[in-house]
Image: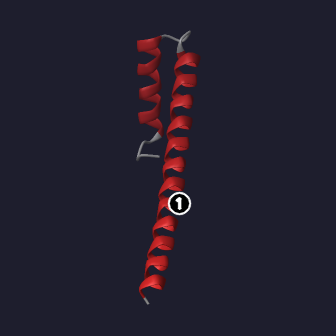
């Protein structure tokens, strides 16, 4: 996972706890989870749109070739 080992992850966790406090940690985790979920959803929607556009482009090209021939 991004080349991070156990020691690095523990150091990051300790820093996050110092900055935000143990009480805010669940809220930070929830916000991070929502952000990652929304990012993945956006990426998958963008891929679907790209695939749909590619299919429409192929259809229009084949129809143009058919009319010219």
Q: Is residue 14 above or below residue 42?
A: above
Label 1 Cα neighbours within 10 Å, binned few <14 / some 14-19 / many ≥20: few
* Quadrant in the picture for residue 22: top right
Furthest-front residue in this view: 67
- Work out which quarter of the rendered image holds the C terminus and state it: bottom left
Q: Which residue is mark 1?
A: 52
Query: Residue 68 appears at what percent x and percent y?
Result: 41, 85
What percent of the width, then of the height, locates residue 16? 44, 20
What residue is shown at x 56% (from left), y 30% (from top)?
A: 33
Task: From this view, report whether residue 62 is shown above or below residue 41.
Answer: below
Q: Could you tell me which residue is drawn at 51 percent across and 28 percent down?
A: 32
Look at 51% across and 31% down and name the residue there: 35
Out of 22 and 24, give the one closest to the viewer: 24
Residue plotted at (48% across, 60% down): 53
The image position of residue 10, as x and y in percent, is 47, 29
Please, is residue 62 above or below residue 9 in the view? below
């Amino acid at each position: 996972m991004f080349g991070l080992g156990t020691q690095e992850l523990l150091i990051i966790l300790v820093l996050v706890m110092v900055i935000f406090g143990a009480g805010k940690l669940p809220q930070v985790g929830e916000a991070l989870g929502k952000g990652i979920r929304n990012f993945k959803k956006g990426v998958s929607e963008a891929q679907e749109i790209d695939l749909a556009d590619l299919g429409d482009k192929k259809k229009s090209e084949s129809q143009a070739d058919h009319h010219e021939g």
